[in-house]
Image (cartoon, rainbow, N blue to C red):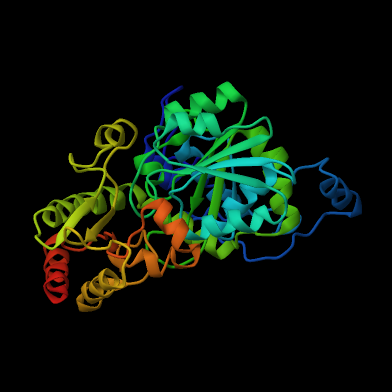
Amino acid sequence: MTDSPRPQQPHQPLGLDTLAIREGIARTQYNEHNEPMFLTSSFVFDNAAQAAARFMGEEEGFIYSRAGNPTVAAFQNRLAALEGAEACVATASGMSAIMATVMSLTRAGDHVVAAYELFGATLQMFTILQRFGVEVTYVPIEDTDAWRAAIRPNTKLLYVETPSNPLTKLTDVRALAAVARERGVKLAVDNCFCSPALQRPLDLGADIVVHSATKYIDGQGRVLGGAVCGDAKYINETLAPFVRTTGPALSAFNAWVLLKGLETLGMRMERQSANAMKLAQWLEAQPGVGRVYYPGLTSHPQHALAMAQQKTGGAIVSFELGRDGEDLYGPLLRERAWRVIDACRLLSITANLGDVKTTITHPASTTHGRAGAEARRASGVTEGLIRIAVGAETPEDLIADLAGGLAAAG
């Protein structure tokens, strides 16, 4: 339900920023202006017959907050509108959203094709699922032919995050969606790095969009949350029953915080993307930096693709230390990367991203540390790689702080 200060003209679409502020508001009898927070575990029925009807799905209404909550529903409706989806299910974290997506579509004996270039915890999750009989084949994210060749008769899902974490590699979503349709499998896109403010994978042909709402949707590093968006049939008939039964429910409090985060999503992403571009351009000119990974730069090998399916290059900048002839996976580069990070005084040393506060991390020893050396090599995560999730501070301050870090590395 959309709240508006005045009636809209018929068929007049609302802009993304308007949807981010107004969509999903359903006022109570008190006519509050801000979204209410329903902190309750259960809901009372008028009589036993109504209770029975709701439990059997014969009557719409809330039963228990694990199965549905008005504040959570408001967040789901708003995010679905921003992604151009028919429906959305929210979860307790981004990883639970990924898990629910994969497990709702597969069973023992099924097969998933995924990119090598995935978040470390996602790689670990796929390893766990293989113990339960779900096979996984990894392919290079940008090689559409490799995706096509990897599909088997028992393949149920193609899973990709674009841009990838932490190297900002992209897949051509339109091309991969065409392969998925051709072979009759679902395509799920992790849209964490861009959010719907910068990229809408469903518009590009994807079937499912997955979010760690903990990141840019919140935007201030306050709460955990996840979400899955897609068509009503999949979300309501396949995913929602799985989430309701297995229990990774989003709390009403976290949903309310995420609703507030969505209100400023567009302006935050615009500012943080602009800051990231300035930082990436500066890094390219630094003698101690071997390579900069940022899709907004013309030097990025997939810059044209990024500009075709994203509004900006995003707010994640990764860069590699290293000199000619050095072992990119050796301990000396790790020591140098740690010196850069430890010398920064403004940038926060944390693996979280999406915050208005800029964060810096060493992926090989944090986000991808448990994935193992072989998985890191396959995804290109070297010991000299540093990832910066650029915030909304004054960009010159960020550059000055990182300059001190690079100077300390020698």
Image coords of residue 97 (percent x, y): 58, 52
Residue depicted at x 57% and y 51%: 98
Picture residue at 30% right of the left edge, 32% below the top: 305
Q: Nearer the viewer, residue 113 or 1?
A: 113
Q: Is residue 1 above or below residue 219?
A: above
- 191 versus 43 height, above or below: above
106 lies above or below 264: above
Q: Which of the 4 image quadrants contains residue 307?
A: top left
Q: Is residue 320 left or right of residue 166?
A: left
Q: Which residue is at the front of the view, 329 or 173?
A: 329
Q: Residue at x 60, y 56 (%)?
A: 127
Quadrant of the image for the N terminus?
Answer: top right
Q: Is residue 118 left or right of residue 381?
A: right
Quadrant of the snapshot with the C terminus:
bottom left
Where's residue 332, x and y in %? 26, 73
Query: Is 340 situated above or below 255?
Result: below
Q: Position of residue 40 (x, y in %)?
A: 67, 65
- Identify which residue, 198 or 339, lies in the foreground: 339
Q: Quadrant of residue 365?
A: bottom left
Is residue 28 something one can see in this rendering?
Answer: no
* Left or right position of 366 against 402: right
Asked whether residue 319 is in view, the answer is yes
Judge by depth and name the residue closer to the eye, 113 or 270: 113
Residue furthest front in the image: 325
